[in-house]
Image (cartoon, rainbow, N blue to C red):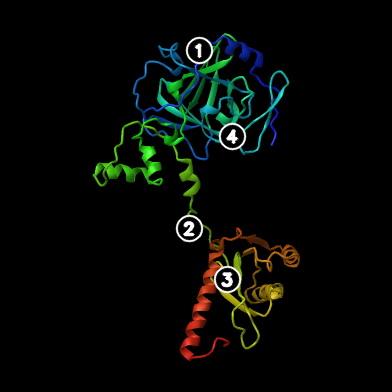
Amino acid sequence: MQIHEKQNILNETKIKEELQNKNDKTTLSSTVYNEINRTTFITDSAPIIIESSVSDPKHTLLANADTRSKAKVSFFIDSGASQHLINDKRLFSSLDETADSIKIIVADGKIISSQGIGKIYFQTITKDGIHEICLQDAYYLPQLECNLLSVKRITEKSFTVNFNKNKCVVMKDKTVYLEAISNNNSLYEVIMHEDKVSNHNFAYNCNNHNCLYLWHKRLGHRNINSIKQLVKENLADGIQLDNCQHIGDCIHCIKNKLSESPYPKEAKYRATHPLDLVHSDLCGPMPTQSISGKYYILTFVDDYSRYSMIYLLSKKDEVLSKLKEYIAMTRNKFGRTLKVLRSDNGGEYIGKEIEDFLKEQGIVHQLTVPYSPQQNGVSERKNRTLIEMTRCLLSEANLPQRF
């Protein structure tokens, strides 16, 4: 993927001069801070405000009194950047350096490439409270002279960015989450102290030996609440937790504890007329050949009435002929035509012949996701019912499996 920033409103030369004039070059260190509002600019879900620890702040982020004794981190609000671009690797809470790179054309015409993509947290203070901002999908470009916040990426999640002569304000639902002040070069700059930017790499960046997340690591990545319960109820000796308030997400837990979400027990959609939707599946081959030489069971189940037709097949390539037989029978018997056929991705359903036939008949073919039989649950349940019924009948009659 390549993104060419040909018209970047941020003048690279001005930024270089601005950065050279800054007196404080102290490096950024990882920090620990109290719980605050959590807001996400670029995320899959809507921003959530957990709580506010400041009811009536007297200063905005850029108006803190003590600004000369702490290291500063600057971000520039840029309406010409299509992505968040960061030049300091230490700002990232997580960074994937194996991700595909993008190419950026800066103001002097030079092309630079990104060296990773990750997530960044930083804290802001506005008239509406204290907030924590999360930048997801921020690109790491060490050659860049400054950090750029993309207006395009911010507004994609329904945030509003307002510019005036003196400042730029990022808002949502009348709440101000971020303010940038226009500097002498007409650039809108967000300045944060080192204690306003957080590296969320859990206890790896926390120097407190009794940090909650260090114990999370020591105890095999146990649930945080379970560790707190151990201490609260005196269920273990030798565990001491300090209130370091080191917050964040454990990357290893996220990567290695993923589980598939359960499928819904009932379908959200049910057909409203017969043959609007028919489920089909091929079951087999069976371990024992039937008396008539059959190995497979082909089922057609109407979604509306659950009316079912079962065909016994010797080979898989008989599916198309049985499908034509089923369509002709239902059309003649019920006066209706099959509209949608739902099946899995078995080769007997996705061959060119059967696909061409369905197109000729105007029948929509719905295929389930590979290796997800749950999506074809009606047919799968019918197969189970037939197999269990057959076993019970054979057992009761004391007949061999070939019957």
Circles 3 and 4 in contact, beta carbons < 8 Å: no
Query: Callout 3, which amino acid?
Result: Val
The residues tagged by marks 1 and 2 sit, at their Cα atoms, a distance apart of 57 Å
Query: Callout 1, which amino acid?
Result: Asp
Dividing the picture into quarters, in which one does residue 60 lie? top left
| Numbered label attached to residue 378 | none
Q: What residue sits right under mark 2 in the picture?
A: 264
Q: In front: 250, or 319?
A: 250
Q: What residue sits right under mark 1 in the picture?
A: 24
**Where 178 falls versus 298 (above or below)?**
above
Q: Work out whether residue 11 can be spotted.
A: no
Q: Work out whether residue 88 can be spotted.
A: yes
Q: What residue sits right under mark 3 in the picture?
A: 301
Circles 1 and 2 in contact, beta carbons < 8 Å: no
Q: Earlier in the sequence, mark 1 or mark 4?
A: 1
Circles 3 and 1 in contact, beta carbons < 8 Å: no
Query: Callout 4, which amino acid?
Result: Ile
Q: In front: 313, or 238?
A: 238
Are there few (<14), some (14-19), or many (20+) residues within 10 Å of tag 2? few
Q: In front: 223, or 352?
A: 223
**Where 67 falls versus 173 (above or below)?**
above
